[in-house]
Image (cartoon, grey):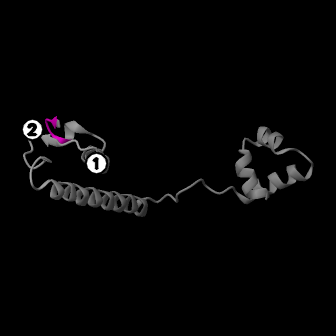
Amino acid sequence: MVLFWALDRFSREGVTETLNHLQRLTAAGVQFKSFTEQYLDSTGLIRDAIIGFLAAIAKQERVRFSERIKTGQARSSKKPGRPALAPEVIAELRQLRSTGLSLKKIQLATGIPVATMHKYLA
């Protein structure tokens, strides 16, 4: 049996990871019990209900996390990802490439990463 003071002392990785740890213990035949939270006790008759309850909390936490991310993105005035290169910069890249310079030499001259140049010169 694993005895812990409180669930937040057992694991601070969040509800989902904590549930995964408890499910691994259960699968290995190890019981668990919280000293201060009497409802967290896998030795009693409601063991399966506790796992189900924690699974529901973990699912709800994932939903709320997703909602917070989407809300934050909606509030942000920034568009996700790197900003696009200006048309005159793209024209300069094409002109340098047409002279036969390698992408690495163009990178050294302009400071624009090779991966970005692939996006615009492909």
* Residue ID for mark 2: 35
As drawn, is 94 to the left or to the right of 66? right
Which stretch is magenta?
3-7
Residue 14: image x %, image y %?
29, 46
Q: Secondary structure at mark 2?
A: loop
Neighbor class of circle 1 (other Cα within 10 Å; few <14, some 14-19, many 20+) is: few
Quarter occupied by the N terminus: top left
The reply to whether the C-beta atoms of the residues labelled 1 and 2 are less than 8 Å apart is: no
- Identify the mark at residue 67; answer none if there is no mark: none
Residue 43 position within the rendered picture, expressed as x and y whole percent measured from the top left: 12, 46
Instruction: Decide which of 94, 104 is in the foreground and name it.
Output: 104
Residue 33's image quarter?
top left
Marks 1 and 2, how far apart at CA: 21 Å
Residue 114 in percent (x, y) is at 74, 46
Q: How far from the left and from the top, in percent, is residue 76?
A: 43, 58
Snapshot quadrant of residue 64: bottom left
Q: Residue at x 37, y 60 (%)?
A: 66
In the displayed orientation, state which residue is furthest to the right: 99
Is residue 4 inside the magenta stretch? yes
Q: 92 or 50: which is nearer to us?
A: 50
47 horizontally vs 28: left or right = left
Q: Residue 67 vs residue 5: left or right?
A: right
